[in-house]
Amino acid sequence: MSSKPDLTWMYTQMVRIREFEERVKRTFTDHPGVIRGHTHLADGVEASIVGSVSTLREGDQVLATYRCHGYPLAMGTSADAMMAEIYGKATGLCKGIGGSMHLTDPANGFLGTSGIVGQGIPHAAGAAWAAQIRGNQDVVLSFFGDGASKQGSFHETLNVASLWKLPIVFVMENNGYNVVTQSFQEDANAAAGQDLSIKATGYAMPGVTIDGGDPVAVHEAVGAAVQRARDGEGPTLVESKVYRLSAHGNLIAPPGVPLHYPEHEAIEVFGDTEQYAAALRGDPVPRMRGRVVSEGVLTSDEAERIAQEARDEMQAAVQFGLDSPYPELDEALAYVHAS
């Protein structure tokens, strides 16, 4: 994944994800009250997302955590429909009923997300089992955070996936924080200096830890795991080390109280400005931009044109969401059960 078209695609998708997340964050201050529930951003995780989904082919599927905007966007989902869903509008992916944490687009292979930590992991195994039964070498990617690796669903699913040699790749995006708790403070493995991919050992599957800020490195590692799954050799656990640049989630304020997206926990909770400054220096988006320009893949003007197109696209998505109607009240129970 190092040709000019491949690297250009990676850079373009990373910029699109970043600009989408920026527009979501700005909605809280620019359009108070439009987003009424919890929202979790993945700025800083773009390289891991793009490098992973770049390994997919038609028929493959993805399930993700609630920090989920980037995956469907890179997989071809409409930015307009995504923004409208986050705004709770009838033109959204799920008709405004799901919101930010429940984006779903099966037509593009994105099977959905959940606000419950680790819940999507066994669902992904179910999708992988179905793919195994179909026998068409389709693969499922299961994305989750490091906190989910402490849930029973993680251990139970890795166990059965290994036993049945399911065609699934588990991608743990370790952003260093479980809400406001720094991961190394509560995980014995991490405190001992070991990568969390060591947890794969207990389930007889390969485990690898990679730099999640490098989309090419992510593509290579996840791609190898995907090929292993296609060949019937079973699952792999990939720990992708990233650093989210926004706080865990937005604040929910009572009516009339101005909303804003809080500062990252490194600053707001721990007062560690140097840790956050170091994370900004390693920001994967400008890092990728520097790479494609320095390697002659794009000129500075071409890279800026792509960035401006992404800004325009996401601002148009905001306007589409704002202009869209809310669902009718009589639709509130329409999708609760099958008729």
Image (tube, rainbow, N blue to C red):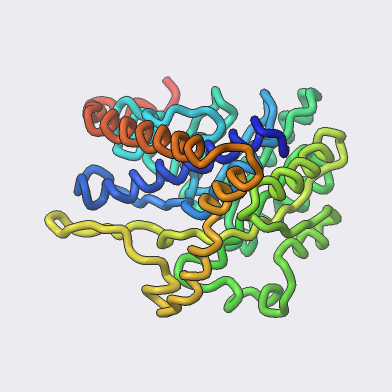
Q: Residue at x 56, y 26 (%)?
A: 108
* Image position, residue 163 (x, y; %): 84, 47
Rendered view: 97 above or below 136: below
Tell which of 249 and 47 is nearer to you.
47
Look at the image and tell me in which quarter the C terminus lies.
top left
Q: Nearer the viewer, residue 54 or 133?
A: 54
| Residue 132 occupies quadrant | top right
- Residue lying at 74% horizontally and 53% vertically, measured from the top left: 237
Query: Is 205 left, or right, of 23 in this rendering?
Result: right
Residue nearer the viewer, 291 or 62: 291
Q: Does residue 96 appear in this view?
A: no
Residue 307 lies, with reference to residue 134, above or below; the image says: below
Q: Quadrant of the N terminus?
A: top right
**Which x, y percent locates residue 330?**
23, 26
The image quadrant of residue 54 is top right
Which residue corresponds to the image point at 63% horizontal and 60% vertical from the top-left?
Answer: 241
Q: Residue lying farthest left?
A: 256
* Residue 136: quarter of image: top right
Left or right: residue 162 compared with residue 295: right
Is 81 left, or right, of 189 in this rendering?
left
Residue 259 appears anywhere in the view: yes
Residue beneath the point at 41% across and 29% down: 93
Tell me where residue 273 appears, x and y as whole percent.
43, 76
What is the x, y in percent for residue 84? 33, 33
